[in-house]
Amino acid sequence: MLARHYQPEDAAGIDRMGLGDVRIDRDRIVVAGKRNELLGCLVWRPGSIVHELRVGCGVSRRNVADSLSNFAIADAVARQWYLCEGIFVTDSDAMAKYAMDIGAVEETGKRVFTLALR
């Protein structure tokens, strides 16, 4: 499964996924699938905060998630932002399990807050 950067032609597919607060001007958006048939989407903000990961249903969802995650990690490293950690913000048990499956460690007793600056 090949992941790639979001293109304006992907807007309709992104809208169908029902994502939350995605900002074209500040988020990095990675998609998988054809222009009108997106299979998955990962949205992260520079600073390594993953706040959207949608892969739909079916047997290939783990492959789609891996493809999106690997692409985003390579993108962050290639940009030389000197990032050494990624932060997953989730209230989903499935997303938490995926994060732990790929090596993330849950920070117990901590809460994560985000502040909109506009």
Image (cartoon, helix red, strand yellow):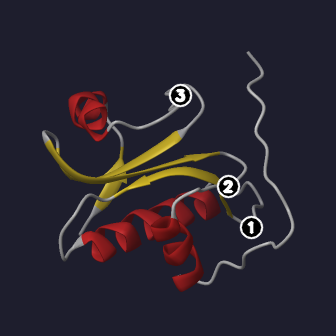
The Cα atoms of the two marked residues, 1 and 3, are separated by: 22 Å
At a point 76% along the width and 39% down the height, the residue shown is: 114
- Mark 3, residue position: 23
Q: Label 1 is placed on what type of residue?
A: Glu
Q: Report helix, strand or loop for mark 3.
A: loop
Helix, strand or loop status at disc 1: loop
The image's mark for residue 48 is 2
Q: Earlier in the sequence, mark 1 or mark 2?
A: 2
Task: Please tell me how crowded label 3 is: few (under 14), some (14-19), or many (20+) other residues with Cα within 10 Å.
Answer: few
Q: Quadrant of the N terminus?
A: bottom left
Q: Disc 1 marks which residue?
A: 85
Pointer 1 with pointer 2, Cβ within 8 A: yes
Asked if the residue at tag 3 contacts the one at tag 1, i.e. Cβ–Cβ closer than 8 Å, the answer is no
Amino acid tagged 2: Ser
Coordinates of residue 103 in the picture (x, y in percent) = 62, 84
At 77% from the left and 68% from the top, the residue drawn is 84
Residue located at (78% from left, 21% from top): 117
